[in-house]
Image (cartoon, helix red, strand yellow):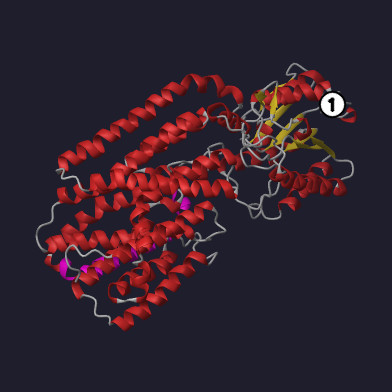
């Protein structure tokens, strides 16, 4: 049984391993493929330490919910609120208005410890990427807090029952088994459309692994010899490191869930071994490693904010070495500051529970909500000013056979042929272009689109989103009534989620041509190296222009993919009409000093209008002469 107030520096050393694993993974997954498992190591440590404290106090009849939550508030909340407030102010200053809204929402969810549920359900097609959300990592704190709300009460109830207390190990094992069974539930099939990665019942297994260890040690003690502890410590450390390195094991659908135990059980055994062992314990007790472990909470909170800011402007993926090194140094400096000037002072405060709740939770909560609301309100005029820069995905109401599609172009035209533009969001963002060119050339066209939904007649082996499925059903049922069909998709993405995509696309064209349709493949844009509007915002706010040309290495790689795809289509269908509008996009992504891109690969409304003007001025025709007859 652990003695009261026994400090184990090796546990801080284990925290150092966990936080460095997470940081390295988030800097670049190539540095440590499974570094995200550092969070799972944290969960085991937290479950072990919290349960040890709770069990000891309940056993000695001096447990108090008020004292427990008072300690949790002083330990967790001050630095968390500092990071959230600083993050809010920075994103208000640097982020585009359309992106700040989601950041403000996530901040509010974070202070209510519900961010794991928030991130489990968000993810609109045009939302900022996960790697660009400054508070995305706070989901793990929310899970821990949810555990702290539930577990102390359950343990207290167990202690109130002689029978349950006598069989407490069986109770914990049964609870873990029940949660493991829940992990096999097919959530989507029962109507729960949430990302399982963030859900608490799957993560409670990891926390309870630590809890189970604590209860066993409190009841039975640690009877391992020093020699056995050394063998166990060395072997489990090797397993933990292997888990952090080996790919394709900790993946859905069994992670989070049953495969989590492959890491959590060795982590728990490592904690046991290091209590008496000497080899691994000495390694984890080296002062610099222990110091990093003490910084681990602050470092965890700051690292993601710093990296999200960098990736917001430089793009998702590996950061340039100089930027990554600067970010690494900055997150450590911020961690040192908050550890010594926020974490430690508040941890030592002799507040009562009421004072802690009032000053360290309730007031900061109000401040964060007020800041989020006021900053967003201040940005509303800017949001209204720019809200029309990108047309919404057209046909939100017209992707079923019961509805009429949106018609663009010269709607009064008596042009005899029926025209359809169909595809993913690259059809949608081209709406102003279609409208302008259609009016100029004297035709009208129906438009059918859905995000991330390429125009295919065969979806075998691929599960489209519900919105996409409606659009594809409409295409399947109605394509025969059209004479001319434009297939407008993002042709610079790899479409790895769709098995045999190229073959399916070729089969779609073959079916349309066999039905006597005039078929056009229209590449409306390309995937460029950076977001024009974000780059311009960075230049305006801090005077930094990191990118000077859209057409860097990323663009070249993506455009080569399009050229290979177009060549394949031309070889297969020599008479196929292929049109590429990406040549009209200037290198800086601006026309008359204004951005024409909504992000890295979609036009805003102004951009689509300007590309139409350039297209017409160049004497080009969208509908070829032979298809006008």
Choose between 566 and 399: the one closer to the eye.
566
Position in image of residue 623 (x %, y %) = 83, 28
The quadrant where residue 222 appears: bottom left
Residue drawn at point x = 10 percent, y = 57 percent: 62
Residue at image mark 1: 621
Say if 428 sits above or below 178 in the image: above
The reply to whether residue 508 is in sight is no
Residue drawn at point x = 34 percent, y = 63 percent: 287
Quadrant containing the N terminus in the rendered view:
bottom left
Task: Confirm whether the magenta stretch covers residue 538.
Answer: no
- In terms of secondary structure, where does tag 1 sit? loop
Looking at the image, residue 451 sits to the left or right of residue 487; the answer is: left
Please report the bounds of the magenta region as a residue range. Answer: 164-192
Residue drawn at point x = 29 percent, y = 81 percent: 226
Task: Confirm whether the magenta stretch covers residue 179.
Answer: yes
Position in image of residue 122 (x %, y %) = 47, 41
């Amino acid at each position: 049984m652990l003695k009261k107030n026994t400090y184990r520096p090796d546990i801080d050393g284990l925290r150092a391993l966990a936080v460095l694993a997470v940081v390295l993974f988030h800097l670049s997954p190539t540095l440590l493929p499974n570094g995200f498992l550092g969070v799972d190591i944290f969960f085991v440590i937290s479950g072990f330490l919290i349960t040890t404290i709770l069990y000891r106090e309940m056993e000695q009849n001096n447990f108090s919910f008020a004292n427990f939550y008072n300690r949790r508030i002083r330990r967790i909340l001050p630095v968390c609120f500092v990071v959230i407030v600083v993050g809010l102010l920075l994103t208000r200053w640097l982020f585009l208005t359309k992106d700040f809204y989601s950041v403000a929402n996530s901040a509010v969810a974070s202070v209510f410890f519900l961010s794991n549920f928030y991130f489990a359900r968000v993810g609109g097609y045009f939302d900022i990427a996960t790697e660009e959300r400054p508070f995305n990592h706070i989901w793990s704190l929310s899970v821990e807090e949810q555990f702290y709300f539930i577990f102390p009460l359950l343990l207290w109830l167990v202690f109130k029952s002689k029978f349950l207390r006598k069989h407490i190990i069986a109770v914990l094992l049964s609870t873990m088994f029940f949660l493991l069974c829940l992990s096999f539930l097919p959530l989507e099939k029962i109507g729960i459309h949430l990302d399982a990665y963030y859900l608490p019942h799957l993560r409670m297994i990891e926390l309870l692994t630590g809890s189970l260890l604590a209860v066993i040690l409190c009841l039975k003690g640690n009877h391992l010899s020093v020699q056995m502890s050394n063998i166990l410590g060395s072997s489990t450390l090797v397993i933990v490191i292997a888990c952090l390195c080996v790919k394709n094991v900790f993946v859905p659908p069994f992670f989070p869930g049953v495969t989590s135990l492959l890491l959590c059980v060795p982590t728990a055994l490592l904690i046991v071994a290091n209590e008496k062992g000497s080899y691994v314990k000495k390694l984890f007790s080296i002062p610099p490693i222990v110091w990093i472990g003490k910084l681990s909470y602050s470092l965890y909170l700051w690292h993601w904010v710093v990296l999200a800011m960098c990736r917001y402007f430089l793009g998702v993926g590996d950061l340039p070495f100089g930027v990554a090194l600067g970010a690494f140094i900055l997150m450590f400096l911020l961690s040192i500051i908050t550890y010594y000037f926020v974490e430690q002072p508040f941890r030592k405060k002799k507040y009562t529970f009421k004072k802690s709740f009032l000053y360290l939770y309730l007031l900061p909560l109000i401040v964060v909500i007020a800041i989020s609301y006021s900053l967003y309100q201040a940005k509303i005029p800017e949001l209204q000013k720019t809200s029309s820069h990108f047309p919404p995905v057209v046909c939100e109401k017209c992707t079923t056979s019961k509805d009429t599609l949106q018609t663009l172009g010269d709607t009064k035209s008596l042009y005899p042929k029926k025209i359809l533009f169909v595809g993913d969001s690259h059809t949608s963002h081209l709406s102003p272009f279609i409208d302008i060119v259609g009016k100029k050339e004297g035709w009208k066209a129906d438009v059918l689109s859905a995000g991330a939904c390429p125009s295919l007649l065969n979806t075998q082996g691929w599960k489209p989103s519900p919105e996409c499925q409606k659009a594809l059903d409409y295409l399947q049922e109605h394509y025969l009534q059209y004479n001319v069909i434009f297939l407008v998709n993002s042709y610079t993405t790899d479409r790895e989620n769709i098995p045999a995509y190229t073959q399916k696309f070729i089969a779609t064209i073959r079916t349309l041509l066999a039905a006597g349709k005039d078929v056009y493949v229209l590449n409306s844009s390309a995937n460029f190296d950076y977001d024009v509007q974000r780059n311009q915002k960075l230049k305006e706010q801090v005077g930094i222009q990191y990118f000077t040309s859209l057409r860097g290495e990323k663009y070249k790689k993506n455009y080569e993919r399009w050229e290979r795809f177009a060549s394949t289509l031309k070889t297969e269908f020599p008479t196929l009409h292929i049109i590429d509008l990406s040549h009209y996009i200037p290198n800086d992504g601006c026309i008359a000093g204004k951005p024409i891109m909504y992000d890295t690969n979609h036009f805003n409304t102004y951009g689509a209008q300007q590309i139409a003007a350039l297209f017409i001025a160049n004497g080009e025709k969208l509908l070829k002469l032979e298809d006008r007859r």
